[in-house]
Image (cartoon, rainbow, N blue to C red):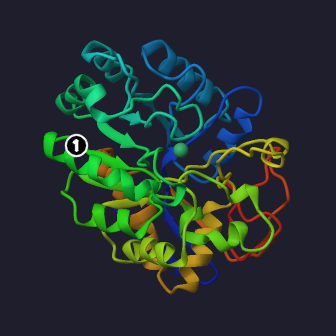
């Protein structure tokens, strides 16, 4: 077990990171998104809100094959699969997804985000699915926003329903995805051992002022929306605390530049190419590089009861200018200088 990252001269090395939340998309651009991810991560958990969604053995298997087909020969990158929880699913459907090797089922409240119009309206509506997941020891991954609440309050407004879910399913392991608010941080920190959470790079790096304090930056628009400095501080502080309940999930969600730069821009930040260099720069500035190996490479695997990754990743202190566009998408930190770079594999 080797979780200690170290700073040696001008490089920082850590066990191969995991990403417990990514959107690889579909179609022509998917291969470049997958390859970009494999340059930074040993494993990534693919979200199931594709069209059509991942809901059974064949759809899960075929999406996994597409991901793996995009990898260069000899790549050790692994795709962790999930299924989408839909109203009307029964125990048998969950068992079939488990047989296809999923590690989690994803709950999107109806209308909460991209391709979530078909989601359940409440946990009660999918009680049979949740019972089956608890029995099979599958993790419940949740987009924790109440869509009927005002944008800024959606995450907080979701917490009471999560609290009653935890009481009804004390053995179900639950991950609240992409935490964005101080309230959700304290909820998870104070919750049982069965409750964990992912945190993205963009919620650790940016606030609402970065997105709309000057000119509007649609490339930082995401769900849940990036919040205040107080919220960002709460997220950073809980990672600094070394709590094993909190681990990295990029929620990297590319949308083509043209789609992001027109009216009705959809939510999603393309952070895959820049997340690790930007996080190492941030944590170095904060004097807390020591907590990154646990956050990026260990706590998520432990929560999911997966073996830790093998191999190591090295970043070098070599500044680079992030291009305006990568893979047809404007990446996180575009047109800015990041002090750290991934060492070419
Ligand atoms: Zn997502």
Q: Is residue 18 visible?
A: yes
Q: Which residue is mark 1?
A: 165
Quadrant location, the C terminus: bottom right
Q: Position of residue 245 (x, y in %)?
A: 30, 60
Residue 239, quarter of picture: bottom left
* Residue at image coords 57%, 58%: 225
Dot 1 alpha-carbon crowd within 10 angstroms: few under 14, some 14 to 19, many 20 or more: some
Mark 1 lies within 8 Å of ligand 1 (Cβ measured) = no
* Rendered residue at 67%/28% (across/down): 26
Residue 95 placement (x, y as % from top left):
28, 18
| 263 w.r.t. 81: above or below | below
Q: Nearer the viewer, residue 252 or 300?
A: 252
Residue 330 vs residue 273: left or right?
right
Q: Is residue 170 visible?
A: no
Q: Residue 238: image x %, image y %?
A: 37, 73
Using residue 169 as the reference point, say whether residue 96 is left or right of it.
right
Q: How many marks?
A: 1
Quarter holding residue 129:
top left
Residue at the spot 27% in from the left edge and 52% down from the top edge? 160
Residue 66 location (% of width, % of height): 62, 24
Quadrant containing the N terminus is bottom left
Q: Secondary structure at mark 1?
A: helix
Residue at the spot 59% in from the left edge and 40% down from the top edge: 23
Where is 254 relative to 219, above or below?
Answer: above
């Amino acid at each position: 077990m080797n979780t200690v990252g170290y700073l040696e001269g001008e490089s920082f090395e850590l066990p191969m990171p995991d990403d417990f939340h990514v959107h690889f998309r579909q179609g022509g651009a998917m291969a470049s998104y997958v390859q970009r991810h494999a340059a930074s991560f040993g494993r990534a958990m693919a979200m199931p809100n594709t069209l059509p969604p991942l809901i059974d053995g064949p759809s899960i298997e075929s999406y996994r094959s597409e991901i793996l087909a995009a990898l260069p020969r000899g790549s050790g990158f692994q795709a962790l699969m999930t299924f989408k929880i839909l109203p009307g699913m029964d125990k048998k459907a969950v068992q079939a997804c488990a047989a296809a090797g999923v590690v989690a089922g994803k709950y999107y409240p109806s209308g909460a985000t991209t391709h979530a119009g078909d989601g359940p309206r409440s946990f009660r509506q999918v009680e049979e699915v949740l019972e089956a997941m608890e029995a099979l020891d599958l993790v419940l991954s949740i987009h924790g926003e109440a869509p009927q609440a005002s944008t800024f309050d959606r995450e907080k407004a979701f917490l009471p329903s999560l609290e009653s879910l935890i009481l009804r399913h004390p053995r179900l392991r639950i991950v609240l995805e992409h935490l964005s608010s101080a309230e959700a941080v304290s909820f998870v920190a104070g919750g049982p051992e069965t409750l964990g959470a992912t945190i993205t790079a963009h919620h650790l790096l940016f606030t609402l002022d970065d997105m709309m304090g000057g000119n509007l930056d649609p490339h930082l628009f995401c769900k849940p929306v990036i919040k205040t400095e107080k919220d960002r501080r709460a997220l950073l502080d809980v990672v600094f605390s070394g709590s094993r309940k909190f681990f990295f999930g990029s929620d990297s969600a590319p949308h083509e530049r043209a789609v992001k730069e027109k009216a009705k821009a959809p939510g999603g930040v393309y952070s895959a190419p820049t997340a690790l260099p930007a996080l190492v720069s941030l944590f170095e500035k904060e004097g807390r590089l020591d907590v990154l190996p646990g956050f990026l490479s260990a706590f998520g695997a432990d929560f999911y009861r997966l073996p830790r990754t093998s191999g190591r990743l090295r970043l070098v202190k070599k500044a680079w200018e992030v291009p305006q566009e990568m893979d047809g998408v404007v990446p996180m930190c575009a047109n800015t200088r990041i002090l750290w770079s991934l060492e070419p594999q």
